[in-house]
Image (cartoon, helix red, strand yellow):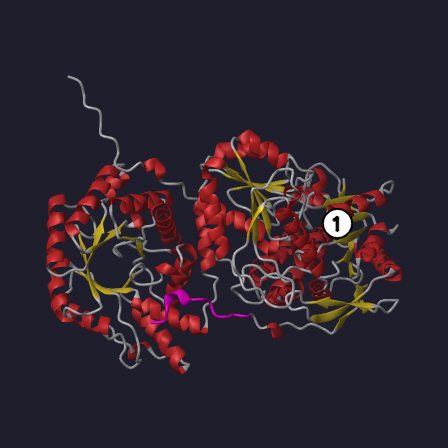
Amino acid sequence: MKSKSPDPPRYDISKSPPVDQVGVAERAKRFTTRSIKNECKRSGLQLVLNMIDLTTLEGADTPNKVKQLCYKANHLHDSIPGLPTTAAVCVYPTLVKTARKALGKSSPVKIASVATAFPSGQGYLDLKLEETKRAVGDGADEIDMVISRGKFLSGDYDYVFDEIAAVKKACGKARLKVILETGELGTLDNVRRASDIAIHAGADFIKTSTGKISSAATIPITLVMLLAIRDHYYKTGQMIGMKPAGGISNAKLALHYLVMVKETVGPEWLTNEWFRFGASSLANDVLMQIAKLEDGHYQASRYFSKD
Amino acid sequence: MSDPNEWNYAPAPEAAKQARISDRYAHFINGKWADPKEGEYFQSTNPATGEKLSEVALGTKRDVNAAVKAARNAYDNVWSGMSPRERGKYIYRIARLIQERAREFAIIETLDGGKPIRESRDIDVPLAANHFFYYAGWADKLDYAFPNRKVSSLGVAGQVIPWNFPLLMAAWKIAPALATGNTVVLKPAETTSLTAMKLAEIIADSGLPDGVVNIVTGMGETGALVVNHDDVNKVAFTGSTSVGKRIQKSIAGTDKKITLELGGKAANIILEDAAIDQAVEGIVNGIYFNQGHVCCAGSRLFVQESVYDEVLWKLKRRMDTLIVGDPLDKNTDVGAINSKEQLETIQRYLKAGVDNGAEMYQPACDLPASGNWCPPTVFTNVAQSSIIAQEEIFGPVLAVQTFRTVPEAIEKANNTPYGLSAGIWCDKGARLFQISNQLEAGVVWGNTYNQFDPTSPFGGYKESGFGREGGLHGLAAYLDM
């Protein structure tokens, strides 16, 4: 019997350009030497707040915990007037309904839900799609999916591509963020390849990490992903969003990310439509810095709500 | 929310008043400040504003004679007979004192030379200190540096340095000379004498015996007096090729040892398989670092035709994000051109490039009203035979050419009288080494550019000079063996 020749790959892997790790580290370091002061710092901090996906992804999450989170997303620190809301809250699928109810229909705060067997991605495809549809049906505006790292690392890029494309279809109108879990990919070449696969398969955002393993977002990794976004934009004119998540817990670091965004993909990306921070403790540090700019001295952390 | 597109960096200037600059600097001879014998001084100005910073002594024959005499005396009576370990202690001390006053050095280097504070703070000053540290370590190990060779010091070294890295070049010259037991007469460049004089303060504070290091300021004529002095045993010069040729002529027939580090017109070669984004970053660092006032600047870019469009698009976008302006601002990427004369030279080349039909691109940037400024510039549609591809411009000007095959790139890269440095951008290690062996350049960087380290030798081929500075090779230049 004649064996059937395999189908050609959906995504031509040879298209991903090589990444030079040393060069990336050097460029990344330059962003952190930018000095952000005065008005630039003030508006940058406000921008950071407005880009946060305020996140709770714990086994111990309860409806009341999520309600508190939703309140905080709208009222970051009421003693400072004029603060923006966060971009979104990010919760597990079972708590999307609770969040929808807590935020109401007209809130500028979006609801993002992780799906697809978060955080490991080790699950059945049909269940992942079902989970995605239910989360969207419950009122999620955005879906944060994880890629199947096992498949990726075993070289089955077609599977990864097809899975992302299928989840994208299941999302309907919801925007899709694709988590690469870069801490498990091993090399920057892999980060670039996974970024290209996700972008070509239909991601609206690419995201670094689940926050569930110790190596999360870094400036070099985010830079490599931003360069993939930029190359895609150069070739197609289509903008893709970027979301570093995990490990960004202070305001100064967040400002350096903004510097990187501005100098890599351009200021058009400096809005929460195209750039997000996935973080749980970043907001309070930013609030502390804003309070310091307002009255000249640091307040103790007990003045800021811990949710 | 304010318009995010308005998110521009606020000014973040380093406080200039952190640095003490005297109204007037005399020569530093025999451990003391010595007024010029003819009583003349000249101005040192801030190239970013045109304002006067200080006055510096104009060295004449009598000053140079006094300096060489002091150096000879210190060599004969103190330094050459001192135990190498003791010599090392002084050099370590100088290194530590530079670190302690790093901030002041960085500010003055930027005020006097126009380079961005980011560079003087992160590169010039730390590297200068590292040079002293590195060579201090060799001082008592010279017997092991060159096995089975008996080495001895030369005597008095006459050293003339350029204005692009004033403190760093002083360190490159002084540190190995002292470690090998020689004494020094140094002549800084006339537009950038101030950090050399601050270094003199440190040398005085370090307790280095009188006369071991002497610094005489002045114009080119002063440098010529140092180089041509009969009692100088070793000449070390970094600067232009034309002056280097003159020096070599003038000392022909003497038994002076000489090292020359001269001009360059380095080729940066991007192959189609390179990591393009990182290559573009390297190209930018290669040519716009220190406003292109770098002898090893990557001033010629060769791009394989298949990736030309992508490289150019990315290069221009990166240039758009470079911040040109106040060198003291911590966010400045490209500072002021070192002098009015140099600015005029660069502008002549820009005009020649345009007149010869090359296409010029400069990002839109608001340049300060006073001072010497030239935006980062790239020329495309450049012919190998055109003047901007042939001559060293010594400014932020990049000439781009394309190539089809690697042999063509190598041929064009080598088709220059210079041979100081080159860069290759390629994802295949074996290919990179193969090409680097065929490039006629003293330094070849692979997938990086403008990396300097005291342990690594640096120097040129062809008309870019001879002799090596840095590393073990740098010791040999100051030893008889």
Q: Residues within 10 Å of mark 1 (few under 14, many from 20)?
A: many
For the image, the number of numbered tags is: 1
| Corner quadrant of residue A42 | bottom left
The subunit letter for the residue under badge 1 reads B
Q: Provide the major secondary structure of the magenta segment.
A: loop
Where residue B286 appears, as percent x and y from the top left, is 56, 49
Residue B214 versus residue A33: which sits nearer the camera? A33
Q: Is residue B119 above or below residue A130?
A: below
Residue A267 in the image: x percent, y percent?
39, 60
Whether residue B353 is visible here, answered yes or no, is yes
Q: Which residue is mark 1?
A: B237
Mark 1 residue type: Phe
Image coordinates for residue B33, horizontal then vertical, percent: 80, 69
Q: Is-magenta flag for residue B3?
A: yes
Quarter of the figure that contains the N terminus of chain A: top left
**Where are the magenta residues, as a range?**
B1-13
| A138 and A302: which is toward the camera | A138
Percent x, y of residue A279 = 28, 63
- In this rendering, the answer to whether B38 lies above or below B422 is below
Q: Is residue A265 magenta?
A: no
B30 left or right of B396 in image = right
Quadrant into which the C terminus of chain A falls: bottom left
- Horizontal side, residue B286 vs residue A13: left or right: right
Drawn side of residue B38 relative to residue A172, left or right: right
Q: Residue at x 72, y 73 (%)?
A: B22
> Which residue does the image show at 13% across and 66% down from the upper left?
A100
